[in-house]
Image: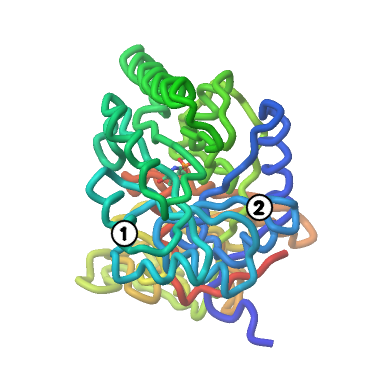
Amino acid sequence: MYEKTRAWIELNMDNLLHNVEQLKSHLFPGCQLMPAVKANAYGHGSILIAKALNQMGIRNFCVAAAIEGVALRKAGIEGQILVLGYTHPEAFDLLVEYDLTQTVVDAVYAALLADYGKPLKVHISVDTGMRRLGERSEHLSSILSFWKYKTLKITGLYSHLCVADGTSPMDVQFTLMQFQRFDTIVDALHQKGIDGFSTHIQGSYGFLNYPEFHYDYIRPGIALYGCKSLPDDQPRLELSLRPVLSLKARLSSVRTLLPGESAGYGLTFTAQKPLLIGTASIGYADGIPRSLSGKGYALIRGRRAPFIGRICMDQLLLDVTDIPDASPMDEVVLIGSSVFSDGISEYKNEICVEDLALQGQTISNEILSCLGERLERVAI
Ligand SMILES: *Cc1c(COP(=O)(O)O)cnc(C)c1O
């Protein structure tokens, strides 16, 4: 078995189930989860995650690109798969062949989808203020006209919130306005006698900060994986979500660095005293941001090993002076918890992706979704 040999992700499927149940327990009757499994399920591994979700009874998914939907279908994923992003007309065949539901990104695109001539399942995107995708919510007659395209089977209407994670009065006001614009268009369509389409607007923060609003689906990504975008985020609905992902690598070598000696590319780090340094077999090509060079730390045997020098493409250096028992082949934890007992003391430490995100001046979503293809993904 070639498992856990270099650098890998461990998926805690019990935590995934826990998060699904937590989210479900706060949904209004009739509302269902449509998890975002785009970007390889935020780096977790879209097939492993979607299969597990299928087994938990989830039958709706959203992805960003048609090819992501194709990969899920090839792996046997059942249910509705909504493509949230743009699909080029030359790839429309994929939508038919793999039974994917395409987003109508605006009126120009609706005409392209109709020109294709074959029946397509679509959800209409409505722009309620983000100004990214969707037909503007004021354009009722334009949106209405999409129903005239006989080959378009319109099964949903949705929008996206852009400041739902914000708690300032301005952000709240803007989000409430987005909900209102969405409700207005939904009501107007119903009044015109148009029915039979589902509605959805909330992602993770849209749901956690505005749980009193309810539609047919919520589209959680980051919350489903048990994370917040940033450590200080405090959504109004406080769920006990648990991280699904741990990131680990092997310690490949341990060596001494003499006072005055430098290490790594650019020799940016210099030892002031004798140091013990370790090399971990994971680098920026695996998704450890290079901007964390000289910042942050990993865990070995329950203790902290600070990053030193520049993070390399495939490896990184750690100061293990305070972990004198650190040995080649030890597990290095980049995200997750590390527990170790030497018979005398017990050491226990944890690194959350949110802390890594803060240090790397980004959000958890980016760190996770950039985790590399070559990492093994192991369900536990
Ligand atoms: C990515 C995405 C989501 C999920 O976002 P989270 O904040 O991770 O929950 C939902 N809807 C759309 C349109 C998205 O692009």
Q: Is residue 282 above or below residue 153?
A: below
Amino acid bearing label 2: Arg
Where is residue 268 shown, x and y percent of the image?
Answer: 23, 65
Q: Is residue 57 above or below residue 197?
A: below
Task: Give the label on residue 59, or none.
Answer: 2
User: Do the residues bearing badges 2 and 1 touch, measured as CB atoms within 8 Å?
Assistant: no
Q: Which residue shows up at 50% across the image and 38% down it?
A: 228
Q: Residues within 10 Å of mark 1 (few under 14, many from 20)?
A: many
Task: Give the label on residue 187, or none.
Answer: none
Q: Is residue 38 above or below residue 148?
A: below
Quarter of the rendered image showing ligand 1: top left
**Closer to the camera in the image, 105 or 322:** 105
For label 2, the SS is loop
Q: Which residue shows up at 64% across the image and 80% down it?
A: 3
**Quick one: label 2 or label 1, which is nearer the N terminus?**
2
Give the labeled residue for mark 1: 293
Where is residue 376 shown, x and y percent of the image?
Answer: 56, 74
For label 1, the SS is loop
Where is residue 231 shown, x and y percent of the image?
Answer: 47, 36
**Label tally:** 2
Where is residue 181 shown, x and y percent of the image?
Answer: 36, 21
Dividing the image into 4 quarters, which one contains the C terminus?
A: bottom right
